[in-house]
Image (cartoon, rainbow, N blue to C red):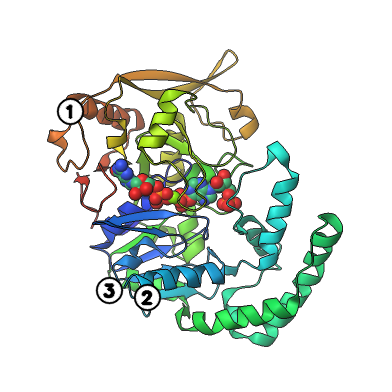
């Protein structure tokens, strides 16, 4: 019984949520390993739309166990609001959810500091989701973070909060000219949240490994994408966690020998939200059309997503970093009606041709994409479920991607709904 990783290969929003929801039908456990409520994973079931932020997308299938791993960062107000929102829609959240003791808490000062820092950076700002993600991971690395388990030990929590806040308030007041935060208020709020979160808190590493040991089908759900990974992405325009495959091991306590498959989610074009280099960005009507037709507006912040052509240089890099065993191509239907479709095959930097992804934002800014052009198709591919029904040119585009990448296409998504999918290879 395999374990399968669903990982973004671009700058996020590839359609991971839809695929995780689909695959959860045959899985018993779904686990998030990194990130926080910066993620926005959309699942459409019939005429109902759900956007999951920290909860795994498997949560909608309430008979499955959903796990929030130690590699994530947890903002209690947002998490509780997410749970309440689902309950209000009739989705049960109870014993089917487990939250790691080891995950780090996002505190009010993390969000306050992030806002102050981003404001100061002007046009050099990262364009974060302002959810406190970066500052929370900063404290984790600095060994001053407060963990979920600390919520269960009020005196220890109080001590850690006071130690942190003394310094954070100095930063807020003296460096950023912001108002200080009140320790008593934060303590009371977090203890109230602790009471509600306590039933979910557990040893998720033990639970995941037990499931794997029992031969259960387990899904690992990545948030963000490989090019936003703190180590492998377009630093500094990245998120603050390991969104790529390596994050599974550290973020869940699962050994590398226990990850059987890694499916890279590839949007049929590319989007990016926030700042940072984007060589294949399309400025002009085609980019605007993809944005409109693809509904490319952030699921978390509502910001418009920048749109561009598929970038093989980035995708090959993502295939390597994640050890992809297959890919799922999503939003093919959004390309319907285009005259031609471009795919970037290399970058030119001055007289040099780069076939390897440069990563560093400063170098990427100087890169000119080199394209191969595919013919478009006029027919609609929306909702198709069989590869043979696809127009010839769509088939050729997909075959072209597969050949250039050297990784098999195992799923093709042709619409936002659960069943709008061409299944080429079963995962479980
Ligand atoms: P995620 O963050 O990777 O889960 O992706 P998002 O949910 O942020 O963005 C993907 C968007 O595309 C969502 O609105 C999905 O409902 C939608 N979507 C996913 N797959 C398809 C598809 O194949 N076709 C179309 N038209 N929409 C899709
Ligand atoms: P999902 O899981 C797209 C981007 C932000 C910003 C950068 C850093 O839905 O694919 P952060 O708040 O994480 O410190 O912001 O990362 N970003 C995402 N972009 N999809 C996401 O998640 C993202 N999560 C963060 O826009 O550029
Ligand atoms: Mg998203």
Q: Residues within 10 Å of mark 2 (few under 14, many from 20)?
A: some
Residue 384 visible, this angle: yes
Q: How far, Cα to Cα, is label 3 from label 1?
A: 38 Å
Q: Residues within 10 Å of mark 1 (few under 14, many from 20)?
A: some
The residue closer to the viewer here, 90 or 169, is: 90
Q: Is residue 198 above or below residue 238?
A: below
Q: Residue reaching furthest top?
A: 351
Which element is circle 2 on?
loop
Q: Which mark is first along the chain, 2 or 1?
A: 2
Q: Is residue 195 above or below residue 86?
A: below
Which element is circle 3 on?
loop
Q: Is residue 218 above or below residue 361?
A: below
For label 2, the residue is: 93
Q: Quadrant of residue 169?
A: bottom right
For label 1, the residue is: 391
Identify the residue shown where x is 53% and y is 55%. 38
Of the 4 image quadrants, the one containing the N terminus is: bottom left
Of the 4 image quadrants, the one containing the C terminus is: bottom left
Mark 1 Cβ inside 8 Å of ligand 1: no
For label 3, the residue is: 63
Residue 224: image x %, image y %? Answer: 48, 50
Residue 332: image x %, image y %? Answer: 29, 36
Nearest-to-viewer mark from 2 and 3: 2
CB within 8 Å, label 2 to label 3: no
Q: How far, Cα to Cα, is label 2 from label 3?
A: 10 Å
The residue closer to the viewer here, 85 or 202, is: 85
């Amino acid at each position: 019984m395999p374990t399968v990783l669903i990982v973004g290969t671009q700058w996020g929003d590839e359609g991971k949520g839809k695929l995780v929801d689909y695959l959860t039908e045959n899985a018993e456990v779904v686990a998030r390993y990194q990130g926080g409520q910066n993620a926005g994973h959309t699942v459409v079931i019939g005429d109902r739309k759900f956007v999951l932020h920290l909860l795994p997308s498997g949560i909608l299938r309430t008979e499955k166990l959903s796990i929030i791993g130690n590699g994530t960062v947890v903002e209690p107000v947002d998490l509780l609001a997410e749970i309440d929102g689902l309950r209000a829609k009739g989705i049960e959240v109870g014993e089917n959810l487990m939250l790691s003791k080891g995950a780090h808490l996002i505190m009010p000062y993390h969000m306050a500091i992030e806002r102050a820092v981003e404001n100061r950076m002007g046009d050099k700002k990262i364009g974060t989701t302002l959810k406190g993600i970066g500052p929370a991971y900063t404290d984790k690395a600095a060994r001053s973070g407060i963990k979920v388990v600390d919520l269960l030990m009020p005196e220890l929590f109080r001590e850690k909060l006071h130690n942190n806040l003394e310094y954070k308030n100095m930063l807020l007041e003296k460096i950023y000219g912001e108002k200080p935060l009140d320790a008593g208020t934060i303590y009371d709020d977090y203890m109230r949240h602790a009471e509600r979160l306590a039933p979910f808190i557990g040893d998720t590493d033990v639970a995941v490994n037990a499931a794997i040991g029992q031969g259960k089908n387990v899904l690992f759900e990545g948030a963000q994408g490989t090019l936003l990974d703190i180590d492998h992405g377009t630093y500094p325009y990245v998120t603050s966690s390991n969104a790529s495959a390596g994050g599974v091991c550290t973020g869940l306590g699962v050994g590398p020998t226990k990850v059987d498959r890694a499916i890279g989610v590839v949007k049929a074009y590319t989007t990016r939200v926030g700042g940072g280099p984007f060589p294949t960005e399309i400025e002009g009507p085609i980019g605007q059309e993809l944005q409109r037709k693809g509904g490319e507006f952030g699921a978390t912040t509502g910001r418009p997503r920048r749109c561009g052509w598929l970038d093989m240089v980035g995708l090959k890099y993502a295939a390597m970093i994640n050890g992809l065993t297959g890919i799922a191509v999503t939003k093919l239907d959004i390309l319907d009606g285009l005259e031609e479709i471009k795919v970037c095959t290399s970058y030119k930097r001055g007289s040099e041709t780069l076939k390897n992804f440069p990563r560093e934002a400063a170098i990427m800014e100087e890169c000119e994409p080199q394209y191969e052009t595919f013919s478009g198709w006029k027919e609609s591919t929306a909702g198709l479920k069989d590869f043979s029904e696809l127009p010839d040119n769509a088939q050729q585009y997909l075959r072209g991607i597969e050949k250039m990448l050297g990784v098999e296409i195992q799923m093709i998504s042709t619409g936002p709904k659960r069943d709008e999918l061409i299944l080429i290879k079963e995962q479980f």
